[in-house]
Amino acid sequence: MIEFFGEVSAWLSDPANWSGRDGLPNRLWEHVSVAGVSLMIAGIIALPTGVALGHRGQGGILAVSAVNIGRAVPSFGIVGIAFPITLSLGLRPLGYAATLVALVALALPPMFVNAYTGVRQTDAALVEAARGMGMTERQVLTAVELPLALPVLMAGIRTAAVEVVATATLGAVVGFGGLGRFIIDGFAQRRFEEVFVGGAAVALLAIATETTLGWVQRHSDRSHTARKDRATGPPAGDDVVETVPVG
Amino acid sequence: MIRLVGVSKVYASGDRPAVDGLSLDVAEGDIAVLVGPSGCGKTTTLKMINRLIEPSSGTIEVAGRDITSMSPSQLRRSIGYVIQQIGLFPHRTIAENIATVPRLLGWNAGRISRRVDELLEMVDLDLAMRTRYPAELSGGQRQRVGVARALAADPQVMLMDEPFGAVDPIARGRLQDLFLELQQRLRKTIVFVTHDIAEAIRLGDRIAILNVGGILEQYDTPADTLRQPANDFVVDFLGSERGLKRLSLLVIGTVPLEHGPVLAETATVDEARRVMADHGVDWIGVGGDGRLDGWVPAADLDGRHDLSGLSLRRFQSWLTVDASLIDALDVVVTSRTSVAAVFDGDRYLGMLTAEAIARAIVQ
């Protein structure tokens, strides 16, 4: 055991592991950038759609389906499906494209569902009062529904981000870089200290993502109703919307 | 000011109309109360006036203009709107909430700020409330903010949907008082929805009683509705104690008063005994010339010649001329003398008897 940590420490102190294409900084950058780009693409698709459908109260069935499909299909499966598709479409670079498609598909459901539900669950009395005072539909959305839906929206982004950061590891299986490289290559070559470093780096990155976005989410709550709750933070698992009203 | 002509609302899903051929005129400065059991279409009717619901047929005019001649948001900015749940925006301060419509109308910041102060004062709220959030206020305070917000752009017309329905009875009474006081000053044209007939009688200049399916059964002043209910439905809806409810609307000034068994100090005891016999009472009041000094029981007169020098008892039960007949009745039935002395300021006007009140009920 002590010997193993000695190997880990030796790996970490080897300058070769801190520079170049195979170095930790570059792999971390690859990991973060593919996660960031896929979250951005998913956000551009899912957030406006969810918000618009939530405002109109349409698309409940779509939201329910999105949750269920998102839960049912395993991440590894999505990568597996994405690889031959990007291959046949000729998308380059091959591993990157497959990883990106898989991660976007993974991030879409939580973002869409939370955007939809966040807007949809705005207190009907507020919406009626806003309309009754002469706000246009757009003003109802931007001045009332969106500010109040923000924490739920942020919870969706947070959930998606943590899943994407964790799953980006699988990109290495289809030839993409990222922190998964250390795990796959280290395993193949029985360099377990390298597997350990890769695993630990992914775990730390996921925790950092969760913590940062959790903080942002709590500070996006502008409802001024739950001041006491806010100090202690929301109960675990309570912020990801699980049931969606159909209508 | 507000005119509904043959307005109906039929929902695709419903087998009968929610509102059926309703015609209604609300005069400028009046409070028209729509009242009826659930399913009578009172809220639907209200929401058709600001186009939150579009009528299936018929026309609605506000201030002489067909409401379909302007955009819904334009129309709504010119009409104050208050709902039972209030709908204050939790993410905005009280000042920002009140400023909603002025901001939509593009007023400048200075004008909005002055108007917010003015409105807070109008609804009896502390100016320190400006920077608070709705969650920090009590239900009654929130409802006041709701009213202030609806009044913000000084609309001629107000629509109020059970605005005091969600607060406790004591706060509701105070809000009703405040509301009537404000209305005395502001003279808005108001359509007010409630399911509470007592509230309708108290607040309405006219009451529209609606039956299930949006059928107008009677549209009249509260006093006339109570005196002459149009049909059995209205009688039923007004409930028991119709006479008492009517008394709450009438003031003493409308009822002829009796001079009562009252004589001047100089009157003789014989005279007093005759007056007591005529009135069938065993006491005599002493006063005259717009004064009423007190009364004595018949027994005190024994062995005296006239009414001077008696130790007079004060009337425990006296009323001012603007008190309601329901208050008067309460005084009359609980007083030793079975009458209430009525004063206008210091001036004695006369006696009110239970018989006079009973006559007012059936008039």
Image (spheres, rainbow, N blue to C red):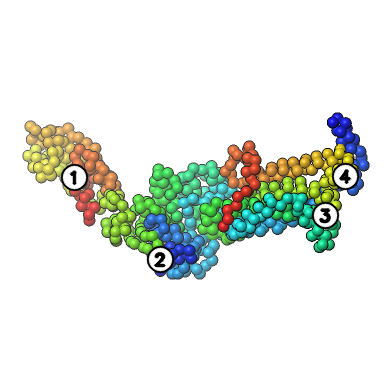
Q: Position of residue B236 (x, y in %)?
A: 31, 55
Residue B289 has which mark? Answer: 1
Residue tagged by mark 3? Answer: A96
- Position of the N terminus of chain B by quadrant: bottom left
Q: CA distance from mark 4 to mark 1?
A: 119 Å
Residue tagged by mark 4? Answer: A188
Mark 3 is surrounded, within 10 Å at the Cα level, by few (under 14), some (14 to 19) or many (20 or more) other residues, namely many
Q: CA distance from mark 1 to mark 3?
A: 107 Å
- Mark 1: amino acid: Asp
Query: Foreground mark, 1 or 2?
Result: 2
Residue tagged by mark 2? Answer: B20
Q: Is residue A153 left or right of residue B23?
A: right
| A39 lies above or below B12 | above
Query: Foreground mark, 1 or 3?
Result: 3
The residue lying toward the viewer, choosing from A77 and A200, is: A77
- Mark 3: amino acid: Tyr
Q: Position of residue A172 (x, y in %)?
A: 83, 49
The residue lying toward the viewer, choosing from B268 and A134, is: A134
- Mark 2: amino acid: Asp
User: Tags 4 and 2 in contact by the CB under 8 Å rule?
Assistant: no
User: Do tags 1 and 2 sit on the same chain?
Assistant: yes
Q: CA distance from mark 3 to mark 4?
A: 21 Å
Mark 4 is surrounded, within 10 Å at the Cα level, by few (under 14), some (14 to 19) or many (20 or more) other residues, namely few
User: Do tags 3 and 4 sit on the same chain?
Assistant: yes
Q: Is residue A145 visible?
A: no
Residue occupying the point 57% across, 43% down: A225
Mark 1 chain: B
Residue A7 is drawn in which quadrant?
top right
Q: Is residue B225 left or right of residue B315?
A: right
